[in-house]
Image: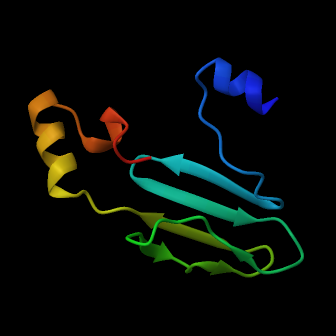
Amino acid sequence: MQETLEWAGISTCADLGDLRLSRRGPLTFAFNFGPDLAAVPAPTEAVFHLGDRTIARCGVAAWSVPETPEIQNKSRRSGLSATETGEIT
């Protein structure tokens, strides 16, 4: 399946087990549906608005990634926000 998705140009991430991710604008949410603690795959520069890097069972975390000056400059030139240009995922 991974090869087919790559061939189609669809980005993927590793199997996260019982962890589910969802994006809404600049926020990324992680939901732990498992019975154990789970580590979120957030980048080191992530700012957590809810929870932290380790989610308890049945827990939730939410984070965003601050825009770097390079991303802000690209966004200004294109007239789109960094989330719209895909610079922040």
The residue shown at (45%, 74%) is 48
Q: Image quadrant of residue 30?
A: bottom right
Q: In which quarter of the image is the N terminus?
A: top right
Render colour scheme: rainbow
Q: In this view, does 70 lie above or below 77?
A: below
For residue 68, side relative to residue 36 (left or right)? left
- In the rendered image, residue 34, in percent from the top left (x then y), is placed at 86, 69
The residue shown at (47%, 65%) is 43
For residue 48, side relative to residue 33 (left or right)? left
- In the rendered image, residue 36, in percent from the top left (x then y), is placed at 85, 79
Q: Can you name the residue that lies furthest to the top here? A: 8
The tally of labels here is 0
Q: Can you name the residue that lies furthest to the right here? A: 35
Q: In this view, does 68 lie above or below 9?
A: below
Q: Image quadrant of residue 57?
A: bottom right
Q: Nearer the viewer, residue 8 or 54?
A: 8
For residue 27, side relative to residue 58 (left or right)? left
The residue shown at (65%, 26%) is 6
Q: Nearer the viewer, residue 10 or 56?
A: 10
- In the rendered image, residue 49, in percent from the top left (x then y), is placed at 44, 74
The residue shown at (44%, 72%) is 44
Q: Image quadrant of residue 7?
A: top right
